[in-house]
Image (spheres, rainbow, N blue to C red):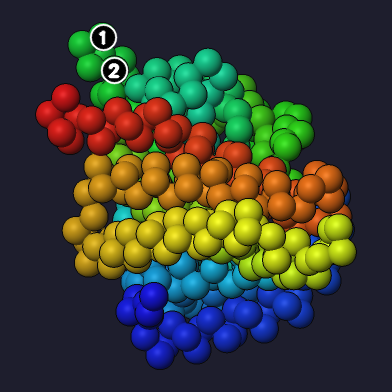
Amino acid sequence: MRRDLFTADHESFRHLVRDFVSREVVPHYEEWERAGRLPRGVFEQLGELGVMGLALPEEYGGAGVDDYRYNVVLQEEAARALVTLGTVRTQLDVILPYFLTYANKEQRARWFPGLAAGKLLTAIAMTEPGTGSDLAGIRTTAVRDGDHYVLNGAKTFITGGLLADLVIVVARTASDPDNRRAGLTLLVVEDGMPGFSRGRELDKIGIRVQDTVELAFDDVRVPVANRLGEEGEAFSYLGRNLPQERMTVAVGSVAQTRAALETTLAYVKDRKVFGSSVSSFQNTKFELAAVATEIEAAQTMLDRAVLELVEGRLSGADAAKVKLFCTEMQGRCVDRCLQLFGGYGYIREYPIARLYADARITRIYAGTSEVMKVIVAKSLGL
């Protein structure tokens, strides 16, 4: 179906991204997967192209463009080339909104030029061992001591934490037994602060180009000047950005499933079994027809939600519906595509194997499918 989501400006940006990905990412992608991270130079190259600073104000070296559709284009073009941009997506889609919304004038002057140039890398540290999706259960503490907070605790599953210069840490600055959501604060920990350390790199089954680490904070003195927003308001801040974070996962899910379909179509047309191409069998036709239909349904739902996000009207419940539908669709469809490769689908040299492994996390991070169902159920009055 024809998509009405993008303008001519978005399509011009698409050509820019497509050229960059083909020249600067695809030739090196396997090497970066083995290394378990994107090199810092990629962020700086994207900074020179204007991608890293697209949403940042012009006075700090950005373009001042507040339009999530450019982020969609970036993900779609990476998926089209059978790669992911890992922590680039996390920085732009998940973390940057916190800086844009809550950084004060002094913080903007201090950090925004480096963010726009791709020279300052970021991470956000929410999840802790034993808490998972329960943000209200955060136990990392930050105790006020004059013009500093003394930060203690541990975080896990932190995307981009290995190279991050700035880590937004969700910490408990007060405790209220009657309201576990109260008393959480966002603090920006900078690389090199005494007591801040990186633990082991976690060996994931998928998205291997995206580093994921454990972080520890042992009496880290974080200046009050590094607090984002008001003390004790972090839970509401996190809730406001969750619709975009969940949309980001859904965008990747649909784009990567479309890539799985395209690479499968090419394979079944070329592969011969019993003297005939795999594409000639009725089962192949039926399977891929079903996959194409599911992608179309998800894409239509997703595009509508993206427009609502851009217009500031996307509710948390609707974002949960979109993430739930798109990620579950990805799991079903990528599995069906891999099946048509037979044994070759299980070999990592074939892109479908990587797409299959990468797909599994989308039903877990940014809120599991089960959490999405709870949110949708609440919106139904259940």
Q: Which residue: 53% across, 61% down?
A: 289
Residue 36 vs 270, above or below: the answer is above
Tell me residue 115's x, y (percent).
54, 64
- Type of the residue with mark 2: Arg
Q: Nearer the viewer, residue 321 or 96?
A: 321
For the C terminus, give its image quadrant: top left
Is 35 positioned to the left or the right of 201 in the image? right
Is 16 positioned to the left or the right of 316 in the image? right
Q: Disc 1 marks which residue?
A: 177
Please tell me how many numbered marks the rendered image carries: 2
Disc number placed over residue 180 in the picture, else none: 2
Q: Nearer the viewer, residue 354 or 282?
A: 282
Q: Nearer the viewer, residue 277 or 164?
A: 277
Residue 3 vs 126, above or below: the answer is below
- Label 2 neighbourhood size at 10 Å, few (<14), some (14-19), many (20+)? some
- Type of the residue with mark 1: Pro
Q: Which residue: 87% across, 64% down?
A: 275
For the N terminus, give its image quadrant: bottom left
Helix or strand or loop: what does disc 2 sit on? loop
Looking at the image, which residue sits at the far top?
A: 177
Tell me residue 155's x, y (percent).
57, 27
The image quadrant that residue 75 belongs to is bottom right
Residue 99, can we see it? no
Is 241 positioned to the left or the right of 338 in the image? left
Residue 291, can we see it? yes
Residue 208 vs 143, above or below: the answer is below
Q: Which residue: 62% across, 48% down?
A: 336
Is 243 positioned to the left or the right of 213 in the image? left
| Mark 1 vs 2: CB contact within 8 A | yes
Disc number placed over residue 43 in the picture, else none: none
